[in-house]
Amino acid sequence: MTETVTRVDDADGTTPAPPPPPSRRRRRRRTVLIASAVVVVAAVAVVGALGLGGGEDEGASVLPRTGAVVSVTRETLTERTTVEGKLGYGTELPLPVKATGTVTWLPEQGATVERGDELLRVDDRPVILMYGSLPMYRSLGPAPQEDEQDAADDQDAGGRQPSAGDGKSPSSSGSPAPEGAGTGGDTDVSQTSSELWGMDVMQFETNLAALGHTGFTVDERFTDGTAAAVRRWQKSLGLAETGTVGVGDVIYSAGKARIGSAGARLGSAAGENTLAYTGTSRKVIVDASAADASWAVRGSAVTVELPDGTPVKGRVASVGKQATTPEGGEGGSGRTATIPVTITMEDQKTIGRLESGPVTVEYVGNEAKDVLAVPVAALVALAEGGHGLETADGRFVAVRTGLFADGDVEVSGPTVREGMKVRIPE
């Protein structure tokens, strides 16, 4: 092995003598000191972990190996879980269009239709939205309406339809007058056998009055006053003033309707799938795991986190009863069966202008009320197994753990008490 030496001359040209090599004894002593320090530190760590020895004087001479000191607190722990959902207006439903003819006008998708507005036009005749739960299942007018077959059977040779004065029984409409109506019996003199009765009459009259067409009593009777109000309503729509509402003239919904996709084009025949709609309130649909959907209880409070991080309060509105598997796969093929959970937000303004997109739904899983808790970071693993806490004076006490939530953990044990000081290991 060749050793290279660099020569440096002093200013006077002489070569300085090399420094003497370090003493071997000094090097050996230095190594022994370092090794001893390592052993001492390791021994202190072992003693601390086992909770052995350590009087006050001895502990004060050793640097603490733990960090902050915290108190055992009494609180309610809440375990929160998040699932993914989709913001939108819900599932589109077909409008029950009963008008027959050719579709001549359709609204734009996304438009909002209110009571009294046109939903579409068939044969250039408007189909109007009204609010209610009963479907329009018959025509409403001042006299009982006969079905097409009965009208054909009763038509005379000249093609004349029978009128109320022809002596036809009012029971032919399928909605008989109440008990006592007609001639004889105890009845209101203003009540006649030609009046149409039913809850559908009251529903229509409620809407008619809400649109400002009054002059009648809102009840189950379609009176001459109702017919007069209908004629005024028809005039405002540019229709023939017949006083009778056809079965295809009105469609009922629970409230405002948001127009969805169209199932028909202009010029095609009107039918049940001509136009779809949803409600106007935005909601969230969660495909919840069927095996872990115990949280989805109608009325339960949840928090919806929008894409921009804004939290919005919501409630479970409905829970599907039929589980499905994505893409029709089997549950055993790795796909999880899910059920649809619908969540509504009462304060729609908090959502802003966002109409659709992915969101996160947070719900309360488990809850432990009035329990002792410490930060999870305060737990230490004991040599004999299980978990423990290190007290402020360096002792270790065993604890039983319960619910973990929000960075805290429920603890219990014979020596654990509220306000006790424990250390968090560094």
Image (cartoon, rainbow, N blue to C red):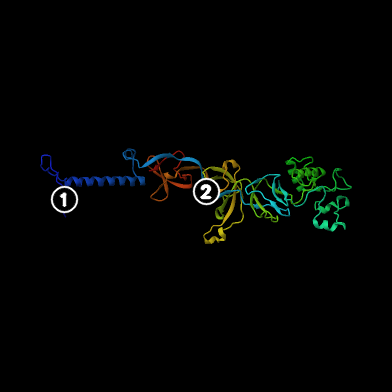
Q: Separation of disc 2 and disc 1 at Cα? A: 69 Å
Residue at image mark 1? 4
Q: Of all residues shown, which one is farthest toward the right?
A: 184
Left or right relative to 86: residue 33 = left
SS state under label 2: strand
Corner quadrant of residue 112 = top right
Disc 1 crowd, CA 10 A, few/some/many (<14, 14-19, 20+): few
Spot occupied by residue 333 in the image (x, y as percentages of width and height): 52, 61
Q: Nearer the viewer, residue 331 or 229?
A: 229
Give percent across and percent down for residue 206.
Answer: 74, 43
* Quadrant occupied by the C terminus: top left
Secondary structure of the residue carrying tag 1 is loop
How many labels were placed on the picture?
2
Residue position marked by numbered label 2 in the rendering: 82
104 versus 66 height, above or below: below
In this rendered view, identify the residue nearer to me: 371 or 182: 182
Q: Amino acid at mark 1?
A: Thr
The residue closer to the viewer here, 261 or 330, is: 261
Q: Residue at x 87, y 57 (%)?
A: 158
**Which amino acid type is marked by label 2?**
Thr
For the residue pair 213 and 69, the one nearer the viewer reads as 213
Closer to us: mark 2 or mark 1? 1
Q: Within 10 angstroms of label 2, few (less than 14), some, or many (20 or more) residues?
A: some
Q: Is residue 130 rendered to the left or right of residue 401? A: right
- Residue 270 sits in which quadrant? bottom right
How far from the left and from the top, in percent, is residue 57?
Answer: 32, 38
Q: Which image quadrant: the N terminus?
A: bottom left
Please tell me in which quadrant of the rendered image residue 227 appears.
Answer: top right
Q: Is residue 75 left or right of residue 269?
A: left
